[in-house]
Image (tube, grey):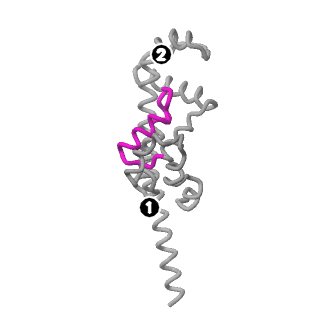
């Protein structure tokens, strides 16, 4: 895993604590696993972050950080993964989860035009919320679990590769 690179990119807990605007995050420093880069906390972070990325709700980063805090996952990674659903990827992502939800619930897909207005949300969301949430939550769980197990497998393969390299280096020295 690119552990050294991530350590360079992510802020340290001390840097976050020193920022006065982030003082409300002080409870995050009571659990060291929330900042450490180990297999378990990173795998949990992928589960949490990918799940939250598929939620069609505002404040996905807050939701991700809250869940990460309670499941002892790496907070910066889980919050960063939420940005998979950014303003550019949200329309196709949520349309795909809507179609997936209609397939799961065996309901017909309705045609709609997306407008970024409160009036549209109040009228159209009432018609599409069930398949949208069913598809989003299911897709979030599927991709979150794929990320969780994928990190475990990739981390293990990386560790085994390093063991082999060390074994070869030791044999060369002898």
- Find the magenta span and give its range: 52-75
Residue at the spot 49% in from the left edge and 33% down from the top edge: 60
Residue 131, horizontal then vertical, whole percent: 44, 20
Q: Is residue 66 left or right of residue 168?
A: left
Identify which residue is drawn at 45% across, 53% down.
35
Q: Is residue 168 magenta?
A: no
Q: Residue at x 50, y 54 (%)?
A: 14
Q: Are marks 2 and 1 in contact (CB under 8 Å)?
A: no
Can you give x and y, in whole percent of width and height, for residue 47 in the image?
Answer: 43, 43
Considering depth in this image, is 72 or 100 the residue closer to the camera? 72
Q: Looking at the picture, does residue 152 appear above or below residue 172?
A: above
Residue 156 image label = 1
Question: Quadrant of the rendered structure where residue 83 is?
Answer: top right
**Which mark is on residue 128?**
2
Q: Secondary structure at mark 1?
A: helix
Residue 137: quarter of image: top left
Q: Predominant secondary structure in magenta?
A: helix
- The number of callouts visible is 2
Tell me, yes or no, whether the highlighted magenta stretch contains residue 55: yes
Q: Give the farthest residue toward the right.
A: 88
């Amino acid at each position: 895993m690119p552990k050294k690179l991530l350590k360079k990119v992510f802020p340290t807990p001390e840097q976050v604590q020193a920022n006065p605007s982030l003082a409300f995050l002080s409870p995050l420093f009571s659990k060291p696993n929330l900042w450490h880069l180990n297999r378990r906390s990173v795998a949990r972070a992928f589960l949490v972050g990918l799940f939250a990325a598929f939620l069609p709700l505002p404040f996905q980063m807050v939701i991700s950080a809250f869940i990460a805090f309670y499941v002892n996952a790496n907070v910066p990674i889980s919050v960063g993964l939420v940005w998979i659903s950014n303003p550019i990827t949200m329309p196709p992502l949520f349309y795909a989860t809507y179609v997936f939800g209609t397939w799961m619930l065996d309901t017909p897909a309705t045609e709609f035009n997306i407008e970024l207005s409160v009036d549209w949300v109040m009228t159209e969301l009432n018609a599409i919320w069930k398949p949208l949430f069913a598809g989003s939550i299911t897709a979030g769980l599927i991709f979150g679990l794929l990320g969780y197990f994928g990190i475990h497998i990739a981390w293990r393969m990386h560790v085994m590769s390093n063991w082999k390299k060390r074994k070869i280096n030791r044999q060369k020295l002898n």
